[in-house]
Amino acid sequence: MSYRRLKDNKIYCRLKKQYEMTTAIPRCINVAVVGLSGAEKDKGAVGVGKSCLCNRFMKLSSDDFKDDHISLLSNSDFSGRVVNNDNFLYWGDVIKTSEEGTDYMFRVIEQTEFINDSTFEPFHGVKMDPYIKRCVATKIESPEKLMYICRSQLGIEEKYEQKVLPPGEFNVDGFLCVFDVSVVPGRSIVKQLETVTNILKNIKNTKKPVVLVTTKNDKLNEAYVQELQKLVSHNEFKKAIPFIVETSAYLNVNVDAAFIALAHIIDRFKCRTKIVPYLESVKNGY
């Protein structure tokens, strides 16, 4: 082979590699967001922030962020295609790029518990198991289930974007377990600790990775943070929970970081994942 042909071949190979890198299909990561759920007697006056965390992560425009999401439903809304007789929401998919330049396509579900607006008791969906067991399912299916966008969508789904949960099994790659560090009327720290402890134990049994996420750090109670630190210091959780990501969906702090940290664990990322403390993130402009 002549020098000219060799040089042209090297240029071709380099350009081909660059093209493949720029047109590569993003790595798909299926995430289940879990945490304390239930009627007001269980979760208190408001939820722990699972929906707000998902909303902030999935919606690229800040104008699309909403802090008012569904939990109290009518029978018709529960059986509609968005909820689809299941106690979970499908938030759709979004592509995010990590600091090292890796593109990930995240598909996100939120495991929750919907309450009947007539009886104020939880709906019994397709799965009858208690929440702490049901929420850690790693294989999920709900034919023709629509992506959730906002609570106003229910009953007039045809007026909103119609994206369907991909057919077949949704195989969960990892979990984000949410812990609310704010004080909520009607909810004891003991109740949340008990629920999250049991959820984490059940996730550990699945052999799937988990990232523990604290929500509402913009109004945190330091005593709650200390109780959570005690929990993760237990021997059974030391290896299972490599770090805690401190977030605020309301202020959009560390939300992307939580999901990307989970993707790194799933992909066995060889470099150390940088987790920036909440106050430092706020100081540096998120």
Image (cartoon, grey):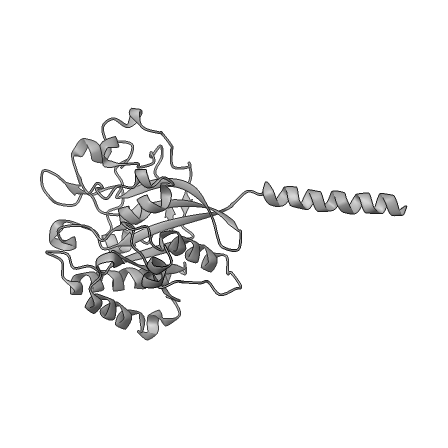
The residue lying at 80 percent from left, 44 percent from top is 9
Q: Residue at x 36, y 46 (%)?
A: 57
Q: Quadrant of residue 86?
A: top left
Q: Is residue 140 visible?
A: no
- Residue 181: tell me if it is visible: yes
Picture coordinates of residue 87, whole percent (x, y): 25, 44
Name above or below for residue 64 compared with residue 161. below
Q: Is residue 132 left or right of residue 206?
A: left
Q: What x and y, as percent, mark residue 94? A: 42, 42
Estimate the x, y position of residue 118 in percent, counting from the top left. 9, 38
Quarter of the image for residue 167 reads top left
**154 in relation to 206, above or below:** above
Nearest the viewer among 134 and 284 is 284
In this rendering, the answer to whether 216 lies above or below 84 is below
Using the image as rendered, state which of residue 271 and residue 157 is in the foreground: 271
Against 201, residue 170 (above or below) is above
Question: In this image, 128 relative to 54: left or right?
Answer: left
